[in-house]
Amino acid sequence: MKQAVTFGEIMLRLKSPAHERLFQSPALEATFGGGEANVAASLCNFGIPAKFVTVLPSHDIGDACIGELRRFGVDTGAILRKDGRIGIYFLETGSNQRASNVIYDREGSLISEVKPGDINWREIFADADWFHITGITPALSQSAADASIEAVKIATEMGLAVSCDLNYRAKLWNYGKTAPEVMRELFKYVHAGIANEEDCQKSLGIKSDAKENNVTKGELDTAAYEALSNKVMSEFPNLKYLAITLRESKSADINNWAACLNDRTAFYLSKKYELTDIVDRVGGGDSFGAGLIYGLKTYSDNPQKALEFAVAASCLKHTIPGDINRVKVAEVEKLMGGDGSGRVTR
């Protein structure tokens, strides 16, 4: 089986215990996480070999990060090692009406200094059939944006399917370019796009003509997303699929979760899950992305089933602490089949 390759930043994640405020007690939980790394780990859990490409420091923290990825079976052989720093993010998990909060400390991280020519993409893609990236990496710096566009161009030239989760991050686009200036160029090479309620507007500069959704109200009009997906696909003819996640946020602990998929022949809407006791929503979008890649590769003739797999996989991620979704295909398919009882398995 050919590999899926992902490219981006993995960070040291420092989280306050349980639902405490940051530094409420003198302890932080140290793990690792980052969009594309999370996707690679999930794909390995689903039985699809995955390689993660990044740049990490040549010290013990970089070693620990690589060790964590290898626990999931991720191929780390293409990770570059240099002197420098790893990015950090601090997480405070919200509860009820108090939102979660993320503070980034990633400026000057090694991945932000990557530039075209640093990575031998032709060698890395030789045994691959899928390449995944997000809108986070191009937001780090101009050179990282240039390297990202280089990667998608070469992947397309070599016949790989390219997926991109737009993942708009307002706190990152600060080096002089707006997100649409960069992402519209990169998105020309994407076959499977992934977005949430604001990504198409903020990352691509595309706004639906339909009635605008207000995500803070906790209810979404899916007709608006059908119109939006049609508009995006009309502007990017290379797109074969566009998936949009539909999160209805009632509070930090209670969300409704679903998604839709446009494949140019039909508009598919998934089952809606009621998430009433969210453990950790960070990484929920990445788990959806990995589930969609698995679904499109495995159920290529059944887009509805591919979408349902992605949504169910992400639903389960909301029950798991940490960035990475630690579930197997059988668990996802069990939930897809309607068994969400949570009964003890003996």
Image (tube, rainbow, N blue to C red):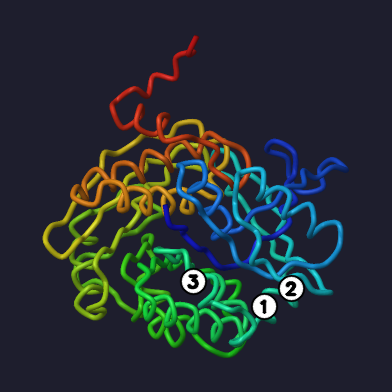
Q: Secondary structure at mark 1?
A: helix
Q: Position of residue 135 (x, y in %)?
A: 49, 71
Residues tagged 1 and 2 counted as in contact (Cβ below 8 A) = yes
Reading the image, the residue beneath label 2 is 109
Work out how far the residue at label 1 is from the one at label 3, CA to CA, in angstroms: 13 Å
Reading the image, the residue beneath label 3 is 135
Asked whether 29 or 119 is in front, the reply is: 119
- In the image, what residue occupies the spot 26% across and 63% down? 241
Sequence-wise, which precedes: disc 3 or disc 2? 2
Q: Position of residue 104 (x, y in %)?
A: 69, 65
Q: Secondary structure at mark 3?
A: loop
Using the image, determine if residue 237 lies above or below residue 311: below
Reading the image, the residue beneath label 1 is 112
Using the image, determine if residue 86 lies above or below residue 149: above
Number of marks drawn? 3
**Type of residue at label 2?**
Ser
Estimate how packed mark 3 is, as few (under 14), some (14 to 19) or many (20 or more) residues with alpha carbons within 10 Å.
Answer: many
